[in-house]
Image: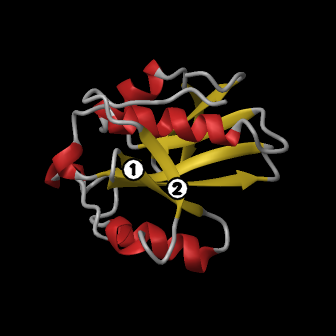
Amino acid sequence: MTKDITDRRGRRVTLEDITDENWRDVADVAPADDQRRFVAALGARYLLLSMRGGLWNSLAVRAGDEVVGHVMWAYDDEEGAHWIGGMIVDAAEQGNGVGRAAVRALIGRLATLPGYREVRLSYHPDNAPAARLYASLGFVPTGDFEDEEIVAARTGAAEA
């Protein structure tokens, strides 16, 4: 049995596959205006990357009864690492701990997959809130860059 992961408002945060019932809600997720230089302006861009790119897997982020975000993941055979990418939390939900809960839930999900040993992600050097969030969850910069973004990794157990 998995431990419930909640946001600061006490809502259970879960990840769910993209379906005919939730894809429009995910597509409409929009970050705060000041985050648009770090993430896509709408969840729709990440959904298209997942559908057309052949690498990424999109998930809806639900807090209680509402879709409030998007996150995607992939597995890199060459590195032997799972990657987290394309996370957006809707502007109206920012500051409620949804992003932290979503990353924790995704780490737990990835830890059940074959080959799990490490999770990686990247973030823009100017995105201080993302850097703090990921560091608090055990991600450590590797010294590598993906385009101009800092790559950080987290090894070991799923609990974050």
Q: N-terminal of the two: label 1 or label 2?
A: 2
Q: Is residue 123 left or right of residue 92?
A: right
Q: Is residue 43 left or right of residue 75?
A: left
CA separation in Å, label 1 and label 2: 8 Å
Residue at left offset 15%, top offset 54% = 33
Which element carries disc 2, helix, strand or loop? Answer: strand
> In the image, residue 21 lies at what x, y percent?
43, 73
Here the colouring is secondary structure
**CB of mark 1 within 8 Å of CB of mark 2?**
yes
> In the image, residue 81 lies at what x, y percent?
73, 42
Which element carries disc 1, helix, strand or loop? Answer: strand
Q: Which mark is residue 97?
A: none
Q: Quadrant of residue 151?
A: top right
Residue at left offset 56%, top offset 47% = 84
Residue at left offset 35%, top offset 71% = 27
Label 1 environment density (alpha carbons within 10 Å; few <14, some 14–19, many ≥20): many
Label 2 environment density (alpha carbons within 10 Å; few <14, some 14–19, many ≥20): few
> In the image, residue 51 lies at what x, y percent?
57, 77
Q: Which residue is mark 1?
A: 62
Q: Is residue 155 above or below residue 44?
A: above
- State the quadrant of the C terminus: top right
Q: Is residue 135 left or right of residue 2?
A: left
- State the quadrant of the N terminus: top right
Q: In the rendered structure, which amino acid carries the disc numbered 1?
A: Arg
Q: Is residue 81 left or right of residue 40?
A: right
Q: Which residue is mark 2?
A: 16
> In the image, residue 158 lies at what x, y percent?
66, 26
Q: In the rendered structure, which amino acid carries the disc numbered 2?
A: Glu
Residue at left offset 61%, top offset 75% = 53
Q: How many marks?
A: 2
